[in-house]
Every structure is written in structure tokens, then in C-alpha cells.
Image (spheres, rainbow, N blue to C red):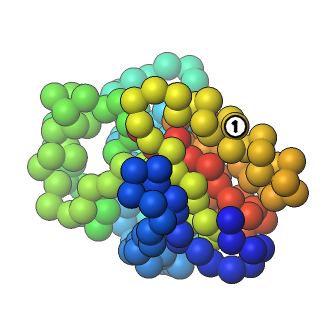
Amino acid sequence: LPSRGLPCHLFYCPMFGRGRCFLESRVTSESQEQILVLGLGKSGFAAAELAASRGAAVTVLDEGGSPELRDRGEQLRRRGVDTRLEWNEDTWSEVAPELVVISPGIPPDSFLGRIAQSSSCPVVGEIEYGYRYCSCPILAVTGTNGKTTTVELLVHVLTHAGYSVLAAGNTGRPLSDAAARSSDLDFLIVEVS
């Protein structure tokens, strides 16, 4: 494990041994970038909050209109985010986004899925979007079986070793939410599939 404060993107794979992961540089600002977030579940809400906190002009679309979504929408509106619920069109033409962030679970054949497919700008998932703003090393866990158990084990072991860690991704806390707290952490442990 890296010593505290040193950026390190080393990993160990049981099949291939030690390696180095070269990742795209992380973004520091989005002042007035136009971002379209598709979906207002936990992940979409977290991505919209993160984008708004970074100075982006954010629009969120969701096909639903449940009381929970209305509450989230109202919270975002108070932060200046344009939130549209019960969206039932497969196009978006009001403001051309520079980036589309799509929430997990949006089916490709839904209205929102078709908006993502027809977009002329980059489309990223919430995990990729959240990663861009993480200021600590990430231990990403993927695979077929045992991901959540592995994440929980890593959190337990690293916490008891004196590191400040947080679990995120498909474990319940969206990575976009954890990214906002990552400057105080030694590691983020992220379930990514």
C-alpha cells in the first residue's frame, strides 16, 4: 500500500502480478459547462449535486414523478439545477450539452436511453463521472462473485490498519457523492460492476 500522501496507481493482480494503471488526468473545474444528467435516482442525484458544486450548468431529466423524485428535484432546484420530471420524449434540444452523465439502470430503449444514444457529445456513466473528481487513490473491485464482500473486507482491513477509507459505487453510496468527500480519505474502495 502507498504511504499516506503519495499518489500511487499501483495494483496487484493475482493472475498478472504487479502493474501500473495510467488513468486520464482528473478534472479540476467545470465552470459553466453544460451537463445533462439522465436519471434522478441516487446516482443521478449525486452526479447532479457534484456537477452543480463544480460550477456547471446542470439539467436533469427523469421519466418518473414519484414523491421521492419530486423531493430530490426540489433540492436540486434550490441549487440552481434545471430538473425535469416525467420526461417522455426521446430527444433533448433546448441546450446542447457538452457532457451527458447517464445513471446505471437506464434501459437503452427508454426515452432517456435514446437521448444518450443520439447525443453528439461524450456520454459517461455516473461512476466514471465521479472518478474524475476523486482526490485520493481508488481501489476498484469488479468481477462476477464476491465483490461486495471484498469491498467490505478491504474497508475493514484498511480501517483497522489506520487508513481513512470509504466504500462507494454499487455498494449503496454513489461515487459522485464519495468524490466530494475524498480529499479527507486515504482510499476509496469502489465496487464497479
Residue drawn at (64%, 55%), measured in percent from left and top?
188
Residue drawn at (80%, 57%), measured in percent from left and top?
164
Q: Is any part of residue 114 visible from this angle?
A: yes
Q: How crowded is mark 1: few (under 14 residues within 10 Å), some or many (20 or more)?
A: few
Number of labels in the image equals 1
Q: Name the residue under label 1.
A: 153
Instruction: Using the image as rendered, state which of residue 181 and residue 92 is in the foreground.
Output: 181
Residue drawn at (25%, 37%), measured in percent from left and top?
112
Q: What residue type is labelled 1?
A: Leu
Q: In this view, does 45 lie to the left or right of 165?
A: left
Percent from the top left, x then y, of residue 45? Answer: 53, 43
Quadrant location of the C terminus in the rendered image: top left
Percent from the top left, x then y, of residue 130? Answer: 51, 57
Percent from the top left, x then y, of residue 84? Answer: 39, 39
Percent from the top left, x then y, of residue 155? Answer: 73, 44
Residue drawn at (69%, 37%), measured in percent from left and top?
153
Instruction: Using the image as rendered, state which of residue 12 and residue 115 is in the foreground.
Output: 12
Q: Residue 148 appears in which quarter of the rendering? A: top right
Q: Is residue 191 left or right of residue 104?
A: right
Q: Is any part of residue 71 visible from this angle?
A: no
Residue sitting farthest toward the top: 66
Is 107 drawn above or below residue 125 in the view shown? above
Is 66 drawn above or below residue 107 in the view shown? above
